[in-house]
Structures are given as structure tokens and as C-alpha cells.
């Protein structure tokens, strides 16, 4: 106490103000803790908001998928009946543009709505072109109610608009795949989404001429019609197709995990190219085209097996 008093007296006598202890660093630590807690709470609330929004959209997709499945089942039955009936052979067209109603490329025309058959329409597409179809449409998975909900959530998490990405949600994507291996391992799951997408496009009325136009008109007469909501959900389905088709199209033996590891932080030319294709949803475009034209897919696979590729 005497030392402290003497120190104060000496400081006062010399006229030099005594330095005060600086406790501001403790204030900063307290603020930092509070800020961290606030940030964590904000992230938690945002995550809860996201989860709630995801669940709402999930329910919408579940209903949309179920409607497409019912149409697909009916289309399959009708296609089986048509195949039983004899059909007069059609002459081959003089050039591709006369077959598909313009100079638009096959895939470009389809993506713009010029095509729209589901799996049953694959043989119709070949018949319209004058060439026989030897490949049966690929089988599509008939999901249970629980599987449909899981698939719907994959679509929700996969979706992204142009100019954005879904790679920031890769933990959710990988978690869904890890706990539901059938999503990635059963090719009929991808075919289900492709057929659902194509069925929805067909209802929009943007089909080919002749047979498909008549089929689309018949669907609308039966009460099937497309709404803006249908278009939005179909676009989301396309993102889901891109997610499931990408690993095989990118030749990633390790599946989605290997692909996402490559493209999240691309360090090679191949990885950068795969990232661009992912962002442009080119994997989905290829998968949808192959679903529409199974003969083209089989021919390509046979060429790859035989080594006759460019």
C-alpha cells in the first residue's frame, strides 16, 4: 500500500500523468464472442429457413413427379398397343430438316420444345424419320412414396439458375447420395427423371408435327395442361438429371464424390472443362437426348466398345 501511495505521490510531484491499464482488448474479446454467437445464430436461422423452403418445394415436386408417372404409365400401355398394330412403312426424308420441321438441330430443337415424346415416343420418333427403331425404351424406376420424396429433395438441392451454381450445396448432395445409393447406382432412376421431363415437355404442346401433335392435343383434351408452375418444376427436374448423369458422362468411376472433388476447385484442364459442362447442364442435355432416342445411345455405346470412335 505504501509503495502504491509513494508511486502516486511521485507521479503527482513530477507532473506526469500515471498510465492507466487498457482493458479495451477484453471488450474486443467480448464483442468477438457476441458476434460469433450472432453469426452462428444467423446461420442456424438461415439453415432452418432453407430447410423449410426446401420441404415446401419438395412437396410440390413429389406431386409433379407422381402426375408425370401416371402419364408415363398410360403412355407405355398405349405404346404397347400401337406396337401390336401393323404400321405402313414411311419413306425416308430427303434431309434432316424436313423430318424435324426446320433447320434446327436435333438437340437444339428438342430443348426449344420441338420434341416431346416420352419413352413410348422413342419408337414414334424413329417411325417419323422413316427408320425403324430396334431399341426398346430403357426401363424407368417405379419409386415408392419414400423414394419419391428422397428423389424430390435431390432435385431441390440440385437446382440452380443460369449464372449461379449448386456446388455450395455439395455436402447435402453427397449426403443424399451416400445414404441412398440407388440414386446413383440404378440407371432406371435417371431414366425416370428423363422420362418425367420429356412427358412434361410433351404436354406443353411443343411437340413434333403429325403423330405427336395429335397426341399432345389428345392429352389437353383429357384435361392435361401445363402451367407456369409445371415449367418451373420441369426446369428443376433438369438440374436433378444433370446431377445424376454427370458422373457417368464424365467417366468418374468414383461417382458424384469424385466429380465434385474435381470441379469444386478445378486444378486441371479436364476439371475446368467438366466444371463448365456442369454449369451449362450439358450432362442433362445428353441424358435427355439419349432417353428420347435409345437407338442413338445404343449405336454410340457399340462404337465405343468396338473402338470405332472419332
Image: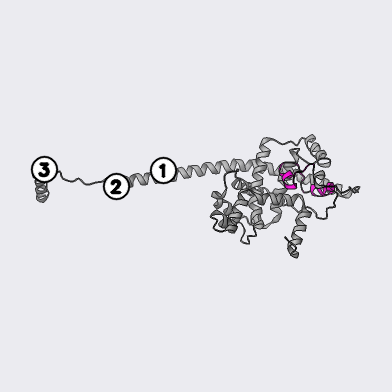
* Residue occupied by mark 3: 15
For label 3, count other residues whose C-alpha is less than 10 Å away and answer few (under 14), some (14-19) or many (20+): few
Of the numbered discs 2 and 1, the one sitting upstream in the chain is 2
Of the numbered discs 1 and 3, the one sitting upstream in the chain is 3
* Residue occupied by mark 1: 38
Quadrant holding the C terminus: bottom right
Which x, y percent locates residue 32? 36, 46
> Taking 271 as reference, is 203 left or right?
right
Q: Specify whether residue 167 is painted magenta.
A: no
Which x, y percent locates residue 212? 81, 41
Q: How many marks?
A: 3
Q: Nearer the viewer, mark 1 or mark 3?
A: 3
Q: Secondary structure at mark 1?
A: helix
Residue 169 visible to the viewer: yes
Of the numbered discs 3 and 2, the one sitting upstream in the chain is 3
Residues 191 and 149: in front is 191
Residues 291 and 44: in front is 291
Q: Specify whether residue 110 is painted magenta.
A: yes
For label 2, count other residues whose C-alpha is less than 10 Å away and answer few (under 14), some (14-19) or many (20+): few
Please report the bounds of the magenta region as a residue range.
Answer: 101-129
Residue 282 is tagged as none
In this rendering, the answer to whether 110 lies above or below 188 is above
Residue 218, located in which quarter of the rendered image?
Answer: top right
Q: Secondary structure at mark 3?
A: loop
> Taking 224 as reference, is 31 left or right?
left
Residue 26 is tagged as 2
Which x, y percent locates residue 7? 11, 48
Q: CA distance from mark 2 to mark 1?
A: 18 Å
Amino acid at each position: 500500500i505504501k509503495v502504491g501511495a509513494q508511486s502516486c505521490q511521485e507521479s503527482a510531484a513530477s507532473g506526469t500523468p500515471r498510465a492507466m491499464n487498457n482493458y479495451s482488448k477484453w471488450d474486443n474479446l467480448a464483442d468477438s464472442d457476441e458476434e460469433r454467437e450472432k453469426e452462428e445464430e444467423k446461420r442456424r436461422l438461415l439453415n432452418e429457413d432453407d430447410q423449410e423452403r426446401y420441404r415446401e418445394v419438395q412437396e410440390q415436386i413429389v406431386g409433379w413427379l407422381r402426375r408425370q408417372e401416371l402419364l408415363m404409365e398410360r403412355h407405355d400401355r398405349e405404346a404397347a398397343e400401337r406396337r401390336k398394330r401393323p404400321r405402313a412403312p414411311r419413306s425416308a426424308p430427303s434431309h434432316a430438316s424436313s423430318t424435324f420441321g426446320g433447320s434446327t438441330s436435333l438437340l437444339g430443337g428438342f430443348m426449344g420444345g420441338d420434341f416431346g415424346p416420352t419413352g413410348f415416343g422413342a419408337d414414334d420418333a424413329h417411325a417419323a424419320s422413316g427408320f425403324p427403331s430396334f431399341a426398346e425404351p430403357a426401363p424407368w424406376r417405379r419409386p415408392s412414396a419414400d423414394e419419391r420424396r428422397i428423389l424430390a429433395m435431390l432435385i431441390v438441392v440440385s437446382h440452380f439458375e443460369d449464372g449461379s451454381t449448386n456446388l455450395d450445396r455439395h455436402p447435402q448432395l453427397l449426403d443424399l447420395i451416400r445414404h441412398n445409393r440407388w440414386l446413383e447406382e440404378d440407371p432406371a432412376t435417371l431414366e425416370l427423371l428423363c422420362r418425367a421431363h420429356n412427358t412434361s415437355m410433351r404436354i406443353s404442346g411443343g411437340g413434333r408435327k403429325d403423330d405427336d401433335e395429335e397426341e399432345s392435343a389428345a392429352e389437353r383434351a383429357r384435361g392435361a395442361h401445363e402451367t407456369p408452375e409445371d415449367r418451373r418444376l420441369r426446369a428443376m427436374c433438369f438440374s436433378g438429371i444433370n446431377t445424376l448423369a454427370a458422373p457417368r458422362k464424365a467417366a468418374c468411376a468414383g461417382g458424384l464424390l469424385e466429380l465434385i472433388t474435381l470441379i469444386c476447385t478445378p486444378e486441371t484442364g479436364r476439371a475446368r472443362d467438366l466444371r463448365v459442362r456442369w454449369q451449362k447442364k450439358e450432362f442433362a442435355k445428353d441424358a435427355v437426348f439419349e432417353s428420347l432416342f435409345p437407338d442413338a445411345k445404343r449405336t454410340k455405346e457399340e462404337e465405343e466398345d468396338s473402338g470405332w470412335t472419332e
